[in-house]
Each structure stands twice: as structure tokens, then as C-alpha cells.
Amino acid sequence: MVSEKYIASIVDGSQALALLLPALGERQSTEDVLATVDGLFFTGSYSNVEPQRYGGEPSVPGTLHDAARDATTLPLLRAAIAAGVPVLAVCRGFQEMNVTYGGTLHQSVHAMAGLSDHRENKEDGLDVQYAPSHSILLKQGGLLQRLAGGVNEARVNSLHCQGVERLGVGLVVEATALDGLIEAVSVNNARAFALGVQWHPEWKHASDALSTAIFRAFGDACRDRMRTRAGNGALFGASTQV
């Protein structure tokens, strides 16, 4: 299952056909998936990437993991980017992108000296939890700054306890929080759109200019992919990844 907000952002924000992929790991061929879709959206989740995937210390007791998702998304994400399939990754998906490229994660950002508490207050209503809570600094001339219309800063929501520790090889920092935590990355020399963000642009995406631009750009990239595949007689669709 996947939250409807992710589906709505693809259908309404990217104007694409949403297909949900089950997390079946090796039981579902990566090659078959990539031959079927025109883009992949790696969503957020309450679960965390298992630390063994990046050589981290064991998680504290009670941490939610999803081994089936890890087995599905980690190989699929890198294969998609290598094949020129557009990729948008948010929250857990953003962390998966970093791990996929050999990066590591802070498991408790709030416990790290010099870093802020990036968690939401779970006692607040969803509108408060997902409201913009801090600023990010955009890389000059980067993909995200271009999507943002050239501004230097933006306001984003923050609902995560994990974050990038060591940046993956081949990833380019697109934005940082004021405390220096990496908030967005792109993939250097990617053949198609490949962006990961730590926040949740899917939440009320149509009411935020940067969120609107992100999903529009992803949809445009999917349509470019569709036209290429249509020339080969293939079916098309953009997909949300569970």
C-alpha cells in the first residue's frame, strides 16, 4: 500500500498514469519493471533502510524496517538511473538514493552535535506536521535552483529522524538545511531526470511553487521517456514505488 498523497502528486502534479509496484525483491525482475514504466517515484515510508545495507551500527530496538522494500528499491533505483529512466525520490527514497550510491546515514539526526531536530511532532495534526518548518539553501546553478526559479532559499517541511551522513559517490548536493544537513541531491551525468529530496513535496503539492515545479519536471521527463519508448512500440506509464 502507499499513501494517496503520493498517487495524487503523480496523477495531478505530473499528469501521469500511476502504477503501484509491490515490494517483491528478486521475485520481480528489475529488467521487466524498467521495460514497463517511464519513470519511478520512490516514496517516503515510516520504515528505515536497514543499517546493514550501508555498514551502519544496529538500529535501536523498535526501529521499523522493511527488508522487502530494501531488496526491491536499492537495485531498482540504480538500474533505473543507469537505463535513463527518470527518478524522483523523497524522504526514505532520498535516503535509498544515497545508500545506493555508497553513502551512509545518520540514524538519529537529532542526536548529532551541531545538527537540528528534523522530526515532526506526532501529536500535531497533519497540516501542522507537514507545514514548512525550516529553510534550505539551494546550490547556485543547480537543478533544484532552476526548478525554483533561481531563488537562493526555500521553505520545506521536515518529518525525518535519519539523514545523509556520507554522501554517495556520483551524487551532487542540490540543497542543504541551515545546519548543514543535506536536503536534496541529483545524480551527476544522469541520462534523465534524477532528483532526491529529504522533505515531502507531495503534500499539497499544488499550493507550493517548488513542489509544483518538481512534479511537473518529473512528468515532463516521463513523457520524454514515453516518446522514446513509443518509437519502439512499447507500452507506457509512470509509476509510484511502494
Image: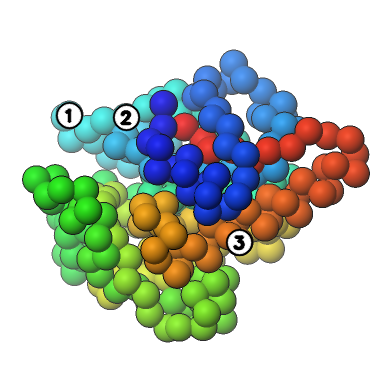
Secondary structure of the residue carrying numbered label 3: helix
Vertical order, 155 against 22 (above or below): below
Rendering coords of residue 121 (x, y %): 13, 51
Please tell me which residue is depicted at 38% across the width and 36% down the height of the picture. 3
Give the residue type at disc 2.
His
Rendering coords of residue 38 (x, y %): 70, 43
Circles 1 and 3, Cβ within 8 Å, touching? The answer is no
Q: CA distance from mark 1 to mark 3?
A: 38 Å
Secondary structure of the residue carrying numbered label 1: loop
Residue corresponding to mark 3: 217
- One can see residue 42 in this view: no
Q: Nearer the viewer, residue 150 or 52?
A: 150
Mark 2 neighbour density, 10 Å: few (under 14) some (14–19) many (20 or more): some
Q: How is the image coloured?
A: rainbow
Give the residue type at disc 3.
Ala
Residue corresponding to mark 1: 62
* Left or right of residue 195: residue 178: left
Q: Which mark is residue 65?
A: 2
- One can see residue 196 in this view: yes
Q: CA distance from mark 2 to mark 3?
A: 31 Å
Say whether disc 1 or disc 3 marks the residue closer to the N-terminus. 1
Rendering coords of residue 71 (x, y %): 50, 27
Please tell me which residue is depicted at 9% across the width and 45% down the height of the picture. 123
How many numbered marks appear?
Answer: 3
* Left or right of residue 33: residue 198: left
Res. 65 image quadrant: top left
Say whether disc 2 or disc 3 marks the residue closer to the N-terminus. 2
Q: CA distance from mark 2 to mark 1?
A: 9 Å
* Left or right of residue 213: residue 231: right
